[in-house]
Amino acid sequence: MSRRHLDVALCSALIVAALLILTREGLAQGGVETRLGSMLMPRVVAGLVILFSLMIGLPSLRGLLENRPLLPAELVETSGLDGVFVYMALLAAYWWAMPLVGFLVATPVLIFAVAVLLGGRSWMALLAVALITPTAIHYGSRELIRVYLPEWSL
């Protein structure tokens, strides 16, 4: 299976979903109302989804249209499902651990484990992303949009 076809199909679906979020007014019912409105965060995320989908989908679409030969990294091996089951187990453990240890403990562990599962090579980069990303999300959600993520409860 070609990764280019998967990229184009999934990015197209994500862009359509993000456009629906951007164009719908009554999507958010209730929640914390701020000066910026309750649809600020969904719209920011939808905009980022469109941006990142274009960054992934356009090179793949260009490769398909130009009939460039596939690189070995662009072939998707579909014979084994072991990684899928490990990934599902990681998500189940994350869902279970979140109320107990909180966002700032559970999320870096999940990010690091998924990165290793997907073949991450640079341990220092993996560790930096696993620590910085959840910290920035936690700070931004608490300070900017007043969404309080789960905290340590043990």
Image (cartoon, rainbow, N blue to C red):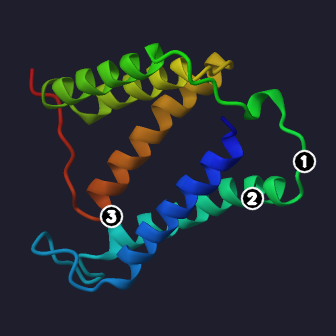
Name the residue located 56 percent from the left edge and 18 percent from the top edge. Answer: 79
Question: Considering the numbered disc 3 on the image, is that residue within a helix, a strand or a loop?
Answer: loop
Seen from the viewer's position, the closer of residues 55 and 99 is 55
Q: Nearer the viewer, mark 3 or mark 2?
A: 2
Q: CA distance from mark 2 to mark 1?
A: 11 Å
- Dot 2 or dot 1: first in sequence order is 2
Q: Which label is found at residue 68?
A: 1
Identify the amino acid type marked 3: Leu
Residue receiving disc 2: 61
Residue 144's tag is 3
- Number of numbered discs: 3
Q: Tell me where residue 122 appears, x and y as whole percent.
A: 68, 20
How many residues crowd mark 3 within 10 Å: few (<14), some (14–19), many (20+)? few
Question: How far from the left and from the top, in percent, is residue 124?
Answer: 63, 20
Residue 101 visible from this viewpoint: no
Of 17 and 111, nearer the camera is 17
* Residue 61: quadrant of the picture: bottom right
